[in-house]
Image (tube, helix red, strand yellow):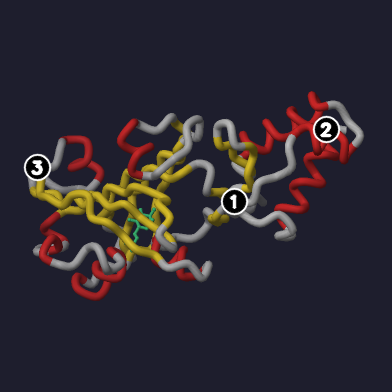
């Protein structure tokens, strides 16, 4: 019964019958509608809240969440490309941009001398004004001298690297872990409590096989669904 209740609500969300941010009927109303106990309804709703398709506002009820962003994992794309492909308007807020000496582990992977200059760019990434991710990119300054002088809020970093520095990024190694957000992440990403972030680390390589970017990202776990095709 519980799976059936969930399937009916899921279906109404997917078809758009229940629009994002619409309040869904109360447990009592749903229990009368489906002819099942309130326990069963609660179990179905709790599971959907955990999956991120519904959310609660304390004392106000249960609401339909925004549709998730489906992210295929097979292709190397930039945030700008990902959002544009979905008809969303990408933008960034620059949280920090500086130069720092490369620590030993990063220097090793980026094949640069320890202590040489790294550009560090920390951005809040938005789609249609929704706060989706915080990304901190590290790049060897010698490969993109003067990068910090460019407008990093209104341009795609990957486009900039390609057009100004001839760096064509063509592959990456990425790890993804679920984690509790820090207080700062929760605030910047405007996250409801109880929602995890996806911590993504990416090493990006150019067509010539040069590793030229290390990125630490925190994505809103309730807004993303990662898809991968297995063979
Ligand atoms: C994605 C990746 C990041 C990368 C970014 C570049 O979001 N997860 O690792 O740095 O794209 O995006 P853009 O070119 O839009 O600045």
- Please determine whether, in this image, residue 192 is positioned above or below residue 75: above
Q: Quadrant of residue 19?
A: bottom right
From where the camera sits, is residue 227 visible? no
Earlier residue among tags 1 and 3: 1
Task: Tell me the residue that label 2 is attached to.
Answer: 2
Mark nearest the camera among 3 and 2 is 2
Residue on which disc 3 sits: 101
Counting other residues with Cα less than 10 Å from the Cα at mark 1, is it few (<14), some (14-19), or many (20 or more)? few
Residue at numbered disc 1 = 21
Which of labels 2 and 1 is toward the front?
A: 1
Horizontally, residue 41 falls left or right of residue 150, namely right
Residue at left offset 85%, top offset 39%: 4
Q: Earlier in the sequence, mark 2 or mark 1?
A: 2
4 displayed left or right of 57: right
- Judged by depth in the image, the label closer to the viewer, 1 or 3, is 1
Q: Residue at x 33, y 31 (%)?
A: 183
């Amino acid at each position: 019964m519980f799976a059936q209740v969930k399937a009916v609500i899921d279906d109404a969300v997917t078809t758009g019958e229940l629009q994002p941010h619409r309040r869904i009927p109360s447990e009592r109303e749903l229990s009368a509608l489906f002819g099942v106990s309130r326990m069963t309804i609660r179990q179905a709703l709790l599971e959907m809240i955990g999956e991120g398709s519904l959310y609660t506002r304390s004392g106000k009820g249960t609401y339909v969440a925004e549709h998730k962003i489906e992210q295929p994992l097979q292709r190397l794309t930039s945030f700008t490309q990902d959002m544009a492909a979905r008809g969303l308007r990408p933008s960034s807020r620059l949280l920090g941009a500086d130069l720092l000496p490369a620590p030993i582990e990063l220097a090793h992977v980026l094949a640069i001398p320890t202590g040489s200059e790294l550009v560090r760019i920390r951005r809040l990434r938005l789609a249609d004004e929704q706060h989706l991710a915080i990304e901190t990119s590290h790049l060897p300054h010698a490969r993109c001298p003067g990068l910090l002088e460019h407008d990093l809020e209104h341009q795609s970093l990957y486009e900039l690297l390609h057009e100004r520095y001839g760096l064509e990024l063509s592959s990456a190694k990425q790890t993804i872990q679920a984690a509790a957000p820090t207080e700062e992440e929760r605030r910047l990403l405007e996250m409801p409590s109880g929602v995890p972030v996806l911590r993504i680390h990416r090493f990006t390589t150019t067509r010539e096989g040069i590793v030229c970017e290390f990125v630490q990202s925190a994505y809103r776990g309730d807004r993303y669904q990662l898809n991968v095709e297995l063979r």
